Amino acid sequence: MWVEARWTNATARAEGVTDLGIGGAVRRYFLTVFPLTVAISFGVGLALAAIWPEVREGFLLSGVYLGLVLGEFGIFIAGLVYGTKKVGPLVQPRRTGVTVGLASGEAKHVQRQVLGREPTYHEQLPVLRAAAVQLREGLARQLLTMPGLLILFCGQAVSHGIV
């Protein structure tokens, strides 16, 4: 009885949840926003290194390092803002997670079905579709911010002379 009530509530929360183009928004981010942010912050880093009073012999190394660090912060902030302003509104309507009312084992079962690790059940299909849309939104937001870490690690490698 409780299991049936939980799935009924999950199905009601899943009603109408749709993806209005998250893939296209992420593609636009990586084709326009990401390269512009990296180029601008890298240029600002080189300019700051050029006007810095102590740095003359290691100008290029300091400029590259500073540009990469600024790029990391720029990408992180741009990813957060873009995710909030562009990716978030593409999941309609905005609701809490469809698997919130399910038991943890049931929620994990739904996630495994969405990821294709288990066969899907026809009666759970509306919940699975809504969970897939919400999972895709979360993964898209992670994808927008995580390249900043790679840029930061590259900056650290440059500063320690590894590269």
Image (tube, grey):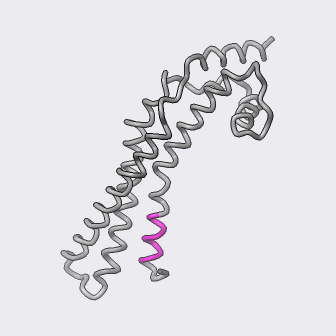
Which SS does the magenta portion mostly show?
helix
Looking at the image, is 17 positioned above or below residue 35?
above
Which one is nearer the viewer's eye here, 163 or 2?
163
Q: Is 40 left or right of 53, judged from the image as shown?
A: right
Residue name at image x 76 percent, y 21 percent = 122
- Quadrant occupied by the N terminus: top right
Residue 138 location, quadrant: top right
Whole-percent x, y for residue 100 in the image: 64, 26
- Does residue 132 belong to the magenta stretch? no
Which one is nearer the viewer's eye here, 9 or 90?
90
Question: Which residue ends up furthest to the bottom in the rendered image?
Answer: 57
Which one is nearer the viewer's eye here, 91 or 51?
91
Looking at the image, is 163 positioned above or below residue 148?
below
Residue 12 location, quadrant: top right
Q: Is 106 left or right of 97, judged from the image as shown?
A: right
Residue 56 location, quadrant: bottom left
Whole-percent x, y for residue 133 in the image: 58, 31
- Does residue 154 belong to the magenta stretch? yes
Whole-percent x, y for residue 45 in the image: 28, 68
Segment tinted magenta in the rendering = 151-158
Looking at the image, is 6 positioned above or below residue 62?
above
Residue name at image x 38 percent, y 42 percent = 82
Residue name at image x 37 percent, y 36 percent = 85
Whole-percent x, y for residue 27 in the image: 45, 46
